[in-house]
Image: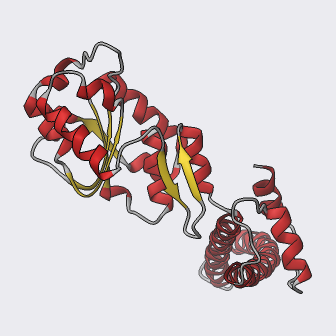
């Protein structure tokens, strides 16, 4: 859940270097790192470390993962004041603590009892982590799966994610096309270079022919990508209008139902392979 929360914060626009996950045991740290790698992408770059290795350091957002959970209030070395102090005082902007507050408070530690009282009084402790998407859909996260669902957000969030993915595809194809064009320019020069042997010039011509075919393919693909991106941008704009008009129910709307509303409002809605994958997931 700590790893998924880190990925959720990345999705909300926070930089990976502004987030640190703290654990209290090395084996626990290994599991967190393994899960960050499994999530992939920028989540792999989120720093995770043990509390003891973070003394004297701080970060904007700290996610503290505590695993002591029993009815006897036994919390091991967390009873030591210096470790509790480090664990609780490393965040500059946002602090998330995942653990059993009842167990910690029952340990006899004055520090943890005080933390429990402060959080309870402020209404900042409970069985679920409240999360909200940019459009206001609220989630109560009880597990890693719940955090993943919150990261995906509402139907409007999924549509925006499809647009962002389409933009990345377009940029990738455009960059590849630029590279091929540069290669073609170099090969054209080689083919006309009389200082080269006839065999070398013929080789350059053969490579040029192959690159020309690649260029045509990439140009076709780029046109398709740009058209898809344009359509998605129009759909996102119209979806936002429907949302502001109160015609989108965040709690129940799916991409399919949003598709129907956009079609009725006059926006052409072509279900690309990317959108179909999003619907399926």
Q: Is residue 252 above or below residue 57?
A: below
Residue 181 or 277: which is nearer the viewer?
277
Q: Is residue 17 left or right of residue 189?
A: left
Q: Which residue is found at the position 21% from the left and 21% from the top? A: 107
Residue 72 or 253: which is nearer the viewer?
72
- Where residue 177 appears, as percent x and y from the top left, is 68, 76
Asked if one can make out residue 228 in the rendered structure from this viewpoint, the answer is yes
Total numbered labels? 0
Q: Which residue sits furthest front?
A: 121
Q: Which residue is found at the position 59% from the left and 40% from the top? A: 145
- Where residue 97 appears, as percent x and y from the top left, is 33, 41
Please name the colour scheme applied to the rendered image: secondary structure
Q: Is residue 38 above or below residue 253?
A: above
Q: Is residue 76 above or below residue 24?
A: above
Asked if one can make out residue 25 in the rendered structure from this viewpoint, the answer is no
Q: Is residue 70 left or right of residue 259?
A: left
Q: Is residue 250 left or right of residue 30?
A: right
- Where residue 185 appears, as percent x and y from the top left, is 64, 83
Q: Is residue 52 left or right of residue 33?
A: left
- Where residue 32 appears, as percent x and y from the top left, is 41, 34
Residue 4 or 118: which is nearer the viewer?
118
Q: Which residue is found at the position 83% from the left and 58% from the top? A: 276
Residue 52 quadrant = top left
């Amino acid at each position: 859940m700590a790893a998924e929360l880190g990925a959720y914060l990345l999705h909300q626009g926070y930089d990976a270097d502004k987030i640190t996950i703290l654990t209290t045991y090395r084996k626990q740290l290994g599991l967190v790192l393994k899960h960050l790698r499994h999530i992939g992408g920028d989540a792999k770059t989120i720093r995770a470390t043990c509390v003891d290795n973070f003394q004297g350091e701080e970060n904007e957002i700290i996610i503290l993962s505590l695993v002591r959970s029993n009815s006897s209030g036994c919390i091991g070395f967390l009873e030591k004041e210096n470790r509790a102090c480090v664990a609780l005082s490393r965040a500059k902007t946002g602090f998330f603590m995942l653990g059993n507050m009842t167990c910690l408070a029952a340990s006899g530690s004055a520090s943890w009892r005080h933390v429990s009282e402060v959080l309870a009084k402020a209404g900042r402790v409970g069985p679920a982590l409240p999360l909200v998407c940019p459009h206001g859909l609220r989630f109560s996260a009880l597990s890693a799966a719940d955090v993943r669902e919150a990261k995906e957000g509402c139907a409007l969030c999924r549509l925006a994610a499809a647009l962002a993915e389409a933009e990345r595809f377009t940029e990738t194809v455009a960059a590849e096309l630029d590279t091929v064009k540069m290669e073609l320019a170099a090969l054209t020069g080689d083919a006309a270079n009389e200082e080269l042997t006839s065999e070398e010039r013929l080789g350059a011509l053969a490579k040029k022919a192959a690159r020309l075919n690649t260029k045509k393919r990439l140009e076709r693909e780029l046109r398709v990508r740009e058209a898809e991106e344009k359509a998605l941008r129009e759909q996102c704009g119209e979806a936002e209008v429907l949302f502001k008009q109160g015609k989108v129910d965040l709690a129940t709307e799916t991409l399919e139902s949003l598709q129907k509303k956009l079609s009725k409002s006059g926006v052409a809605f072509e279900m690309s392979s990317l959108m179909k994958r999003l619907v399926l997931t």
